[in-house]
Amino acid sequence: MSTSSDLPPDEERLRVLETFLVITLARVRERLDHLKRQAAIHRTSELQKPPPDWTLEISINGRTPITVHAGECGMGGSQVRTKTISREEALRALTEGVKACAFCRPDSELGLLE
């Protein structure tokens, strides 16, 4: 068996190092478990969060409104490019020329089209 130069040469100091490593490993595992539980809580809360009533899809440049959607519409784009808006904001956007989604028809739901 070869000896490693980066470890203490005697049993007493090796036992101290072993104890330190065992304690450190337990702390690391505890932290990993904590992070795992936090991630599960986050996923659960995201699943329980009700969808917004209305969303506004924004262009890639991050400024130009593209389409108004009803909140549960699956065509609303990515979360990065979708902004939650109020009923009044949805009405204003539609009356100012922002397109209504052809699938969820927010213009009909808001009473702009009968």
Image (cartoon, rainbow, N blue to C red):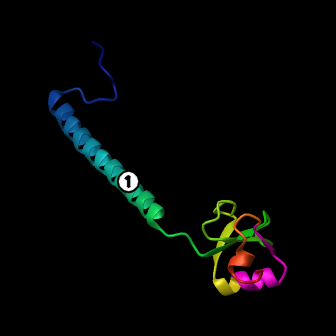
Residue located 29% across and 19% down the image: 3
101 with respect to 46 (left or right): right
Q: Which residue is mark 1?
A: 35
Residue density around tag 1, few if under 14, some if 14–19, many if 20 or more, within 10 Å: few
In what element is the residue under mark 1?
helix
Q: Nearer the viewer, residue 23 or 84?
A: 84
Q: Quadrant of residue 52?
A: bottom right
In the picture, residue 105 is in which quadrant?
Answer: bottom right
Query: Quick check: is 97 in the magenta stretch?
Result: yes
Viewer-closest of 27 and 36? 36
Q: Does residue 29 appear to the left or right of 39 in the view shown?
A: left
- The three-letter code of the residue at mark 1 reads Leu
Left or right: where does residue 46 sit relative to residue 72?
A: left
In the image, residue 12 above or below residue 32: above
Q: Magenta segment: does it hold 12?
A: no
Q: Is 64 rendered above or below residue 11? A: below
Q: Nearer the viewer, residue 101 or 20?
A: 101
User: Residue at image x 18%, y 38%?
Assistant: 16
Position in image of residue 22 (x %, y %): 23, 39
Where is 68 relative to 86, above or below?
A: above
Q: Pick whichever, 103 or 22, lies toward us.
A: 103
Quadrant assignment, res 111: bottom right
Residue drawn at (34%, 29%) of the image: 6
- Residue 21, horizontal then vertical, whole percent: 26, 39
Q: Which residues are magenta?
A: 90-101
